[in-house]
Image (spheres, rainbow, N blue to C red):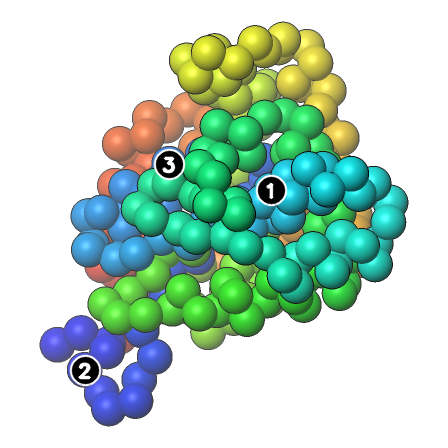
Amino acid sequence: MSSTAAAGAPAPVITIDGPTASGKGTIAHRVAKALGFTVLDSGALYRLTALAARNAGVAPEDEAAVVAIAQNLDVRFEGPHMYLAGKDVNHEIREEAVGNMASRIAGYPALRQALLERQRAFRLPPGLVADGRDMGTVVFPDASLKIFLIADVEARAERRCKQLIEKGISANLPDLLKDLRERDARDSQRAVAPLAPAADAIELDSSSLSIEQTVAAVLDHWRARPR
């Protein structure tokens, strides 16, 4: 019997947190597909906010204006596609400049609060796989399974470089390595919801694992979780 069987029980959640380019998104989608769950790419909401701010000519330093944009964010998710003000922006939000801006604005407490309930609204039966930085610590602290996915920064930079090139986006490995180190520092040192594993999270190092092996490890932990 599923954990949703009890009357009023919330849908189960698997959180996958970790640093930039650790493979969270890919793993989350594959785990969700295996279980028939939906997916929340929480980082996309911050990237969408960053893109909307950039399109509106708002500087990342203008906290009040950035928060106002987040509060009125006109976004729509349809399967793997994301729409901002009716426009498919899947390609644009993956640009490194947008990712860097998202990392810069993600520390604003009012911004995180503005996006919190929007993220929690994704929790619907039969279940949710949520990936991000603070899914297990802040957004879904009662998650059924919490994974903290790590990989050494060199492996992450190589993965990101390969991903960008495959998407037709120019990439420079030394620049990506520098950007990732800076983002890691920002994400782990910010005052609000810093990047850190939840006390009850399982740390999984994917540096030398394939995507299939990492997915299998997460599913093994899901099956072995306390009921």
The residue drawn where x is 65% and y is 33% is 98
Q: Which quadrant holds residue 173?
A: top right
Comes first in the chain, label 2 or label 3: 2
Q: Amino acid at mark 2?
A: Ala
User: Would residue 26 appear left or right of 188 to someone viewing this image?
Assistant: left
Quadrant of image for the C terminus? bottom left
SS at badge 1:
helix
The extreme front residue here reads: 86
Q: Nearer the viewer, residue 45 or 3?
A: 45
The extreme bottom residue here reads: 7
User: Would residue 211 appear left or right of 113 to someone viewing this image?
Assistant: left
Distance from Cα at disc 1 to Cα at disc 2: 35 Å
**Which residue lies under the disc numbered 2?**
5
Badge 3: residue crowd in 10 Å (few <14, some 14–19, many ≥20): some
Q: How many marks?
A: 3
The residue drawn where x is 19% and y is 55% is 36
The residue drawn where x is 18% and y is 74% is 2
Comes first in the chain, label 1 or label 3: 3
Badge 2: residue crowd in 10 Å (few <14, some 14–19, many ≥20): few
SS at badge 3:
helix
**Of the two numbered discs 1 and 2 in the rendering, the one whose residue sits closer to the viewer:** 1
Q: Amino acid at mark 1?
A: Arg
Distance from Cα at disc 2 to Cα at disc 3: 29 Å
- The disc label shown at residue 218, or none: none
Q: Is residue 45 above or below residue 153?
A: below
Q: Is residue 150 above or below residue 65?
A: above
Residue 113 lies, in percent from the top left, at: 67, 68
- The disc label shown at residue 47, or none: 1
- The disc label shown at residue 26, or none: 3
SS at badge 2:
loop
Assess whether mark 3 and mark 1 are in contact (beta carbons under 8 angstroms).
no
Residue 5 lies, in percent from the top left, at: 18, 82
